[in-house]
Image (spheres, rainbow, N blue to C red):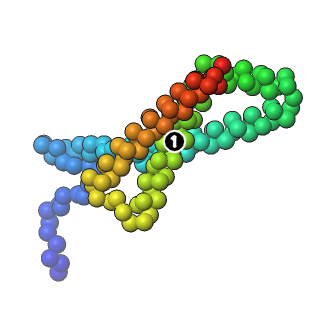
Amino acid sequence: MTDASKTPRERPTSPHLVTGGLGSPLLWRWHITMWTSILHRVSGVGLYVGALIAAAWAVTLASGPLEYAQFKLLLGSPLGKLVMFGLTVAFFYHLANGIRHLVWDAGHGFALKTANASAVVVFAFTVAASLAVWWIALRIGALG
């Protein structure tokens, strides 16, 4: 015979769920490190789009002055500038978070406070570097 109880046991829940006051599962709250992980993937996809834009730039440059002028007109439009600003943000975010991952690969920065602080540094660097690049571009007249 078995020693198993006839009463059903409580079923396990997913690690991202916690039990609410009445026994109903609630979603775990989002942490800044979760955002950095998701945004790292999103920025990587954005950089692939940027690579396609760079390839289009090279193709239009090789196609002649008329095609290149049309491409410059497209990128110089408000939508084009918005896309280029987004690519700048994606670049600096992916760079900063990649350095953060290199530190982790060395075995450092896993403590909760350190991981949260480094996430804040990544966001702060992204904003500061993106705004600095676009401010410099504005000052030298590169934004036409």
Residue type highlighted by circle 1: Phe
Location of residue 45 by image quarter: top right
Crowding near the residue tagged with mark 1, few <14, some 14–19, many ≥20 C-alpha atoms within 10 Å: many
| Quadrant of residue 144 within the rendered picture | top right
Q: Residue at x 35, y 43 (%)?
A: 120
Answer left or right for 74 relative to 96: right
Q: Is residue 144 above or below residue 133?
A: above
Q: Residue reaching furthest front?
A: 140
Instruction: Name the side, left or right, on which 74 lies relative to 78.
Output: right
Measured along the vertical axis of the image, is residue 58 above or below residue 108?
A: above
Tell which of 144 and 109 is nearer to you: 144
Is residue 83 visible to us here?
no
Q: Position of residue 102 (x, y in %)?
A: 46, 59
Q: Position of residue 139 (x, y in %)?
A: 57, 24
Indicate the position of residue 81 as horizontal and vertical percent values.
60, 24
Residue 95 visible within the image = yes
x and y, in percent, of residue 106 in the image? 42, 66
Question: Observer-nearest residue: 14 or 140?
Answer: 140
Q: Count the marks: how many?
A: 1
Q: Residue furthest bottom?
A: 1
**On the rendered structure, is 38 left or right of 115?**
right
Q: Is 71 drawn above or below residue 95 in the view shown?
A: above
Q: Which residue is mark 1?
A: 92
Residue farthest along the right direction in this orientation: 64
Q: Describe the element under mark 1 as helix, strand or loop.
A: helix
Quadrant holding the N terminus: bottom left
